[in-house]
Image (tube, rainbow, N blue to C red):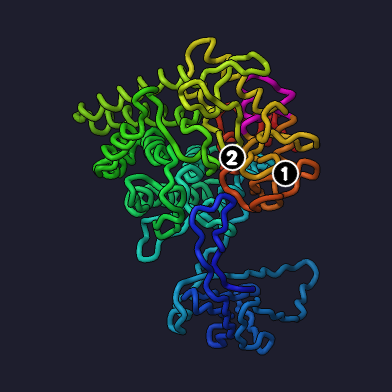
Amino acid sequence: MSVNRASYGQLTEGGPISLPLSENQVSHLAEYQILAVVAKHLEAHFVCAVEIDGRALSFGNSIQQQTCVGKPVRGQMKGILSIPGKTSKTLVARYCLRSGVSPKVMQAASSFPSERPSIRFWVGHETRAQFLVRRNLDYILGCCSVVIPGSREIVCMLTDHVALPLGWNRDNYWQARFLMDARQSLHKIAASQDAARYTQQIERVLRGHLTWVFDLAERPHGYWHRSYLATGKPKDGPVFQLDQQCYPFLELADLYDMFPEQSGFVKEMLSQPVVDDFVGLVASKTDGATGLVATEETPGDDPVEFEFHFSSHVLLWHTLTRLGALLRRIEPGQSQILVRIDSLATSLRKATLAHFLQQDQQSSEWMYAYLTDGHGAFRMYHDGNDVVTLFAREWGFLESEIEMAAWENTMRFANSSRNEGGYCSNGPYAGLGSVHSPGPWPLGYYQTWRFSQVVGDHQLEQKLWKQICDVMQRDGTFPEAVDVVTGECTSKAWFSWPGSMIGSGLLRQENRGKYLEASSEHCIDC
């Protein structure tokens, strides 16, 4: 093993961070029956202990003290464990990764939590859908939620714990939304003892992350950056992504809607000047000629050909609408800012429909363009990252029959070979992907699965559910992209965003009986 930091390498690099020297020193702390690996250049260490029926296992001389530079520490311990017939033994391995390199710090870190993980969760037989929900919930709480050192209340949520352990407002919102959906459903799907334990963890992470994004994540240029280190420092340079500015307010509004008892906390977050800053930022980015709001990159972190992006406008309208409703309930006296928010939302929707609703040159169908310059030039495309387009109907952005029909045409275009660069065909796992990372994406499967439910295409729904189950990894999580022929991971082995969205989809009221309740005659298993 080796204690190292992630390279933070990105497909669309926004600011590389050089790696420190890899130097690992391994030692056996006999007094504590603990194995320690110290990475002095990271000022961090790893400790582990193994127990058999509650008794610590001595490493003895099986693993020698050594220092390894530029290579992993290697060692092994051999032995025989006898288990008489009709008996059992419990083996537990405990691990801790902590800051500091001094022996005192290591000794303090050797006090591991005594609570063992529960093997119970679901009431009844666990289906594949239940396994998916449980494991993605565990992944967020166990691997992606990082408590900031020196604080018990501030939590950074990572999108993955290996390749890119960064905080992204976009990904984090859907992770948080999944936690909220799970929290609301725990009493129906989990054993009471486990439900109480999960509830406590979920509420701590939700409040902690909102504190992190509003209080710790830096905005040196007046807006949230593309991504962040856990410390709150921007990872990337000053590139403006419109959609990233919206998600923190949606997360706050969702928290209040689902858990009104958190009104004091929500009011505290809104007491900052961040709302005025957000409204002023939107106004400053609004083009006077078209009424559209510019962005420099898409939700896929790709530079834009034209500066106005469709799903970001839908998201911004939804955010302004939700923020206005939230302020009316929390701070009803703020009439001046509410007038500005309402005015922005109304004019934005009108401008979005006027400029993005276009006739496709190939099919002659009316659709929503992916990008436009607001003066007649546009691009037809749909991306696995553009999940917001899927929700345009559900959120109430679309009203007329023409608007609804154009949305359905857009989603069907997205899942066809006409969607050049976005749809990956020629294989059993064909599906919506992204120019950002070639191959079908689990996020794309999710979009098509939910779309099939909205339009009532049961055959397509079953096909997509099978694809989702097939590409799900052994631990219940999902990669960024998969091979169109084999369904195996081709990019970013752990990616919490798709699992969070699929999990939330399964927890929807209309899906629980169909996918999650094992006793139901309609339960769908893979």
Displayed quadrant of residue 70? bottom right
Name the spot of residue 7 as percent of width and height, x first: 56, 63
Q: Amino acid at mark 2?
A: Gly
Q: Nearer the viewer, residue 120 or 41?
A: 41
Q: Amino acid at mark 1?
A: Val
Cα distance between the residues tagged 1 and 2: 15 Å
Q: Nearer the viewer, residue 264 or 495?
A: 495
In magenta segment, residue 451: yes
Q: Is residue 505 above or below residue 80?
A: above
Pointer 1 local density, CA inside 10 Å: few below 14, some 14–19, many at least 20: many
Frontmost of labels 1 and 2 is: 1
Give the residue number, with chain letter if any, for mark 1.
Answer: 471
Q: Earlier in the sequence, mark 1 or mark 2?
A: 1
Drawn side of residue 509 relative to residue 333, left or right: right
Q: Is residue 335 above or below residue 76?
A: above
Residue visible at 55% across and 41% down in the picture: 300
Residue visible at 77% across and 79% down in the picture: 80
Q: SS of the residue at dot 1?
A: helix
Give the residue number, with chain letter if any, for mark 2.
Answer: 503
Q: Residue furthest top?
A: 401
Name the spot of residue 480 as percent of width and height, x first: 64, 46
Drawn side of residue 246 relative to residue 34, left or right: left
Q: SS of the residue at dot 2?
A: helix
Q: Which quadrant, please, contains the C terminus? A: top right
Residue visible at 56% across and 49% down in the picture: 12
Q: Is residue 225 above or below residue 252?
A: below
In magenta segment, residue 70: no
Drawn side of residue 238 relative to residue 387, left or right: left
Which region shows up in magenta? Answer: 447-462
